Amino acid sequence: EPEVTQTPSHQVTQMGQEVILRCVPISNHLYFYWYRQILGQKVEFLVSFYNNEISEKSEIFDDQFSVERPDGSNFTLKIRSTKLEDSAMYFCASSLDRALLNFGDGTRLSIL
Amino acid sequence: KNEVEQSPQNLTAQEGEFITINCSYSVGISALHWLQQHPGGGIVSLFMLSSGKKKHGRLIATINIQEKHSSLHITASHPRDSAVYICAVDFNDMRFGAGTRLTVKP
């Protein structure tokens, strides 16, 4: 069964560095999403992406963040100048029709 | 202000019991999602609802748009149903509830 793949599973980065989290959505899906979950807290929406552009973004998704679909298969989340509070599990999801979402297993980001 | 409230926060049941998890929201929405988060952290989408009722196996989800309320029911619960169940609403973006941690004991 097709699945959403995220790499790496765990990323450790020094504060102030840039990180790129990678996702391969299901191939025929049209809608792409990033979410984060800080340890012990609820899931938070970051951004949705459709037709090669951001369709919605939350207040969290400020200038520190950017998304890209560089080659038609990958969907990346870039976090510039990371802060301690960026430590979280980041989930990518894709959907064919904005109905059911298919989530990746997540990337645990640890900022030191 | 939490726009999505779930109850209960924690729920322990014996195998075979009928489970109900509730979700109330305060904003006008286009759809509501029920998600399951496994102990390992992975998230699975169970239902998306915009009206009425949906059923998949032992899971049933209902929504009352006028009352801004949804319920997730599990019939004949099993220990493998133990997980965190999350309600999320499609507003301008997606707003998540804090989740209900379900433990089903054999």
Image (tube, coloured by chain):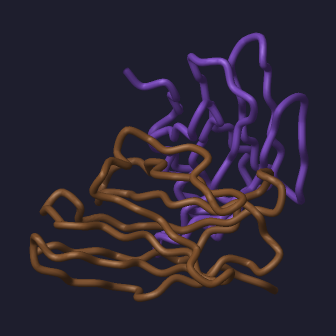
Seen at 31% across and 57% down, the residue is A38
Residue A55 in the image: x percent, y percent? 62, 47
Q: Position of residue B53 (x, y in %)?
A: 89, 35
Left or right placement of residue A63 versus residue B16 in this view: left
Q: Which residue lies furthest to the top in this view?
A: B66
Q: In this view, does A8 lie above or below A45?
A: below
According to the rendering, which colour does chain A have?
Answer: brown
Indicate whether A82 appears above or below A50.
Answer: below
Q: For the point 52% across and 49% down, which residue is it?
A: B12
Q: Is residue B67 or residue A4 the one in the foreground?
A: A4
Chain purple in the figure, letter: B
Residue A77 in picture, x, y percent from top left = 43, 69
Q: Which residue is drawn at 57% across and 62% down?
A: B82
Where is residue B90, by image quadrant? top right
Q: Is residue A36 above or below residue B4?
A: below
* Left or right: A76 in relation to B66: left
